[in-house]
Amino acid sequence: MNFVSTRIITADVGRLVDFYEKATDAKLTRYTEDFAELATDAGTLAIGSTRTLQLFGGDHVASPAANRTTIIEFRVADVDEEYRRLGGLIEGALVQAPTTMPWGNRSLLFRDPDGNLVNFFTPVKAEAIAKFDR
C-alpha cells in the first residue's frame, strides 16, 4: 500500500487554491473548476468542490469547512522564514507562532480559509532530522 493524497472538500475551490498557492509558493494544477492538486515528492494535496461529492455518493459524505481533527503538514526548509514570508496571508488565522516541539520539529500552525489546520515545520533536533532524511 502507498499513501497518495489528502483531499479537502470545499464550497470555494478558487479561494483555497489561491491560498495554498500563496502559502506554499507553488502552482497547483487546476484540472477543472471543481478539482485541483498540489503534487509534492511525498504526496498530493487535492482540493475538490462540494459538487464532486455527487461522484462519491452525495452531499452527506463530507461537510466543507467542518474539520476539527486533521492537520495538513508541510516540511519546509526554514519555518521561521516562512512565518515572516506568510505575514498577512495568515493574519487572523495564526494558531501558534514557530515553536520547537518535544519531538524535534519547529512548527508554525495556522488555519486555511476553510478553517483546516495547516502546520509548516522544520526538523531541528538530530532525531527529527534523521527521521525525515531517510
Image: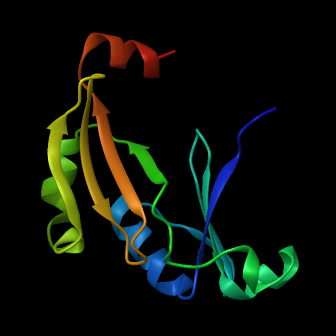
- Position of 82 with respect to 53 (left or right) is left
Residue 133 locus on image (x, y percent): 45, 18
Tell me, yes or no, if residue 45 can be seen here.
yes
Depth check: 124 or 59 in front? 59
Q: Give the position of the N terminus as an image quadrant.
A: top right
* Vertical position of residue 102 compared to residue 33: above or below: above
Depth check: 10 or 80 in front? 10
Tell me, yes or no, if residue 25 can be seen here.
no
- Position of 4 with respect to 84 (left or right) is right
- The quarter holding residue 127 reads top left
Residue 12 locus on image (x, y percent): 53, 88
Residue 91 locus on image (x, y percent): 16, 72
- Position of 17 with respect to 42 (left or right) is left
Residue 6 locus on image (x, y percent): 63, 55
* Vertical position of residue 39 compared to residue 43: above or below: below
Depth check: 32 or 124 in front? 124
* Vertical position of residue 101 compared to residue 40: above or below: above
Q: How is the image coloured?
A: rainbow
- Position of 24 with respect to 48 (left or right) is left
The residue at 75%/85% (across/down) is 59
The residue at 18%/59% (across/down) is 85
The residue at 56%/83% (across/down) is 13
* Vertical position of residue 109 compared to residue 77: above or below: below
The residue at 23%/39% (across/down) is 78
